[in-house]
Image (cartoon, rainbow, N blue to C red):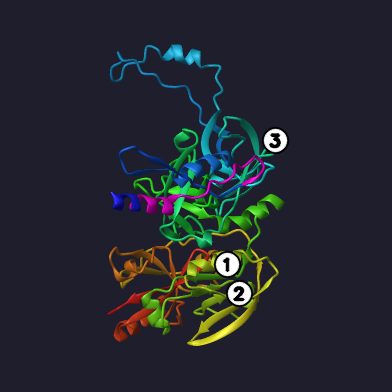
Amino acid sequence: MIQAVVLALLLVTLFACKPREETSPGQAISGAGASAAEAVKPNGPLQIVEVPPFVHLAKRLSPVVVNISTSRSVKGVRIPQFRSPFQGPGDENPFGEFFEKFFENAPRGMRKQTSSGSGFIIAESGLVVTNNHVVENAEDIEVKMSDGKTYDAKVMGKDPKTDVALIKIESNGPFPFAALGDSGELQIGEWVMAIGNPFGLGHTVTAGIVSAKGRVLNSGPYDDFIQTDASINPGNSGGPLFNIRGEVVGINTAIVPNAQGIGFAVPINLAKNVLSQLEKTGKVVRGWLGVSIQRIDENIAESLGLEDSKGALVADVMKNSPAQKAGIKRRDVIIEFNGKAVDDFHNLPTMVASVVPGEAVSLKILREGEELTVSVTIDEMEDDRQASVEPSPEIDAVGMKVQALTKEQAERLGLEGPTGVGVASVQPGSVAGEAGIQAGDVILEIREKSISTIDDYETAMKEAKKKGGSLLILIRRGENSFYVGLELG
């Protein structure tokens, strides 16, 4: 009996906390309080009735979350094809003429397509954050509050590269709004809560933990997703991911369709700069360095004589780019950008993009084992360009069939003259295939020797096979160049 009372008192100490004051509309909503109520049965031990913090979070934060419905006109309307239950194979539908006449006045070219998603208010004026894919191409946007009120909204700006959009409720407000937290402080295993509009059901609350950080889904150049097992479903897109303090730490964006408990959110720190620009100008301006970079694997690290795989390997330097003007070269390894360590190559594009064009930054690089510091004036990023190669098989080597590159193909790739050899095909499971080389790639260098002809390629491969070990090959794919390390044994 005494042990039970002691245990109960310990539970009171651990779980009881002071209730917080209610939040009024127009005031930032953050934080969650919980209170424990005690009840003593006449002939039993001390009982604890604990109200979980998620109850308070849901109550306080639901007003800042909105359901978003959009509609747009699309082509492709046709008269429905109704089939009679008495109609046999090949028989004419006896009701066909009736339905033709019934729908003859219906609009044939366009129809309304609707979709739904989620969002959250970040200012009392009615600014709402959501995903770009929720409102992309929308002609009409309606937001629905947790109390059932609906408002029209308009797009302030969109950023497809981060899948972030900012819309504005067409009403004076004031509206309750959410506080933005610091996603950089999130810890794996930390509790989080999602509120959204899954499957169009309306406000729904789910909770889970941060499963991982820095996830790359290959959906864009700035992938840095938070992975969570808080249930996220179609319709949750654009909704907030809250920490236990009630601050927005992510924008729920993607799911793995065939998996359970795997959802992804854009870190709010990545979105903050984007949202600021969208509010002011309706578009996002990003910094541009002018290099193609790649991850350093074990084979590449061995080939370059590196101690570890940290940093971003420069595979190519664009003409007249800030990087070229600063003297950055192929095979340089960028290990620090403006005082911040580049531990993973994928962090560098976000670092560069966040710099205001015209600003000078310092880069620390490794070049042939020597550490150098260079100053670069960042330029403004322009739209991406794409190019391709049309290969035709010629010879076979290490699982590849290659071809001579024509002058026209080289020009399409932005190469000077007939430089390099094209990869026509790659044998699955071969050394080249396992290294990630693809048909359409162009081989520019082998072990730092330029490759301009088939003869250059054959000579370099013969020498490489004799020496064995790791083979460093410079590949051109579209507008990008990168290194591949082959283990020849």
Task: Kindly check if marks 1 and 2 are in contact, taking CB atoms under 8 A apart as contact.
Answer: yes
Pointer 2 or 3: first along the chain: 3
Residue 331 in sight: yes
Q: Nearer the viewer, residue 178 or 378?
A: 178
- The residue where tag 3 is placed is 171
Provide the secondary structure element on which disc 2 rests.
loop
Residue 265: in magenta span: no
Mark 3 residue type: Ser
Tell us which disc is closer to us: 1 or 3. Answer: 3
Which residue sits at x=71%, y=52%?
A: 280
Which mark is drawn over residue 338? 2
Which residue sits at x=33%, y=70%?
A: 432
Mark 2 residue type: Asn
Q: Where does the magenta region start and end?
A: 7-28
Give the class, few, some or many, for how many residues have Cα within 10 Å of label 2's Cα (few <14, many ≥20): some
Which residue sits at x=30%, y=78%?
A: 488
- The residue where tag 1 is placed is 351
Quadrant of residue 273 within the rendered picture: bottom right
Pointer 1 or 2: first along the chain: 2
Q: CA distance from mark 2 to mark 3?
A: 43 Å
Q: Nearer the viewer, residue 419 or 476?
A: 476
Mark 1 residue type: Met
Provide the secondary structure element on which disc 3 rests.
loop
Residue 215 in sight: no
Residue 20: in magenta span: yes
Quadrant of residue 107 within the rendered picture: top right
Give the class, few, some or many, for how many residues have Cα within 10 Å of label 1's Cα (few <14, many ≥20): some
Q: Position of residue 465 (x, y in %)?
A: 30, 82
Q: Position of residue 166 (x, y in %)?
A: 62, 46
Q: Is residue 207 left or right of residue 245?
A: left
Q: CA distance from mark 1 to mark 2?
A: 9 Å
